[in-house]
Image: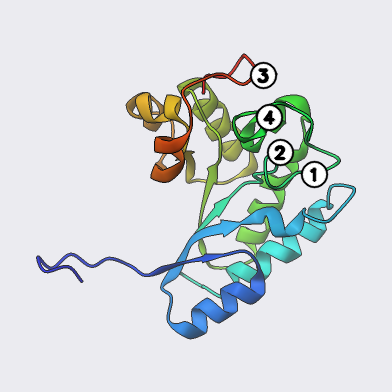
Amino acid sequence: MTSDGYAVPLLANVGSGKDARAAAVAGAEGIGLLRTEFCFLGRDSEPGVEEQVQAYGTVFEAFPGRKVVIRTLDAGADKPLPFLTDASEPNPALGVRGYRTDRTSPGVLERQLEAIAIAAGAHEADVWVMAPMIATAAEAADFAVMCTGAGLAIPGVMIEVPAAAVMAQSILSRVRFASSAPMTSRSTPWRRTGSWAPWPP
């Protein structure tokens, strides 16, 4: 509670069902960031929809009726996946990672959203979904359409690259919410990647 009476919810940052249960026991009021990489890291192939449903469900069940913000897969850079990302690209931090992998490996994001929607439907958590590495309003709109198609009502984005910060008003007109990553936005160089020019930095 702030001095002027505004209640600030205590939301946890988790990366597994075990983390979520521990956060609930500790008194967290919801999940502010569920990092879904725990389903994908250390694997040579994409986990199936049912496996993902079970994994996300272990988080959702820990917070019935509470807000759970889930970030779609943010592979690449320090989290490379052999079936999804190119570890040899010159600037992986601003390259093909997060939402951008849907263009190089279509279907992975769509199946993940399907799994999130099924898991959400089986539990009572208030599920919000956001995409990392969105840089334009068109990308935000595309992600919102994908969420709607999967049956997910609250799409959002992460504002973590300089282009998104500059275009935040336009991007936010396409989605329901945004999560800011100020350290990333401030420290990332204002340049294109050498290997993936279609995206602004």
Q: Residue at horizontal 51%, vertical 23%?
A: 201
Q: Nearer the viewer, mark 2 or mark 3?
A: 3
158 relative to 168 in the view: left or right: right
The residue that label 2 is drawn on is 110
Q: Amino acid at mark 3?
A: Trp
Q: Which quadrant of the figure contains the N terminus? A: bottom left
For label 1, the residue is 81
Residue 66 in sight from this viewpoint: no
Q: CA distance from mark 1 to mark 2?
A: 17 Å
Q: Residues within 10 Å of mark 3 (few under 14, many from 20)?
A: some
Contact check, label 3 and label 4, Cβ < 8 Å? yes
Residue indicated by mark 3: 196
Q: Residues within 10 Å of mark 2 (few under 14, many from 20)?
A: some
Along the horizontal axis of the image, is 91 left or right of 88?
A: left
Q: Do labels 1 and 2 touch, CB within 8 Å?
A: no
Q: How far is disc 2 from disc 3 in space, using C-alphas?
A: 22 Å
- Residue occupying image coordinates x 50% and y 45%: 153
Q: Which residue is mark 4?
A: 96
**In what element is the residue under mark 4?**
loop
Q: Position of residue 85 (x, y in %)?
A: 77, 35
Pick out the residue farthest to the bottom: 25
Residue at mark 4 to residue at mark 1: CA–CA distance: 12 Å
Amino acid carrying label 1: it is: Leu
Q: Secondary structure at mark 2?
A: helix
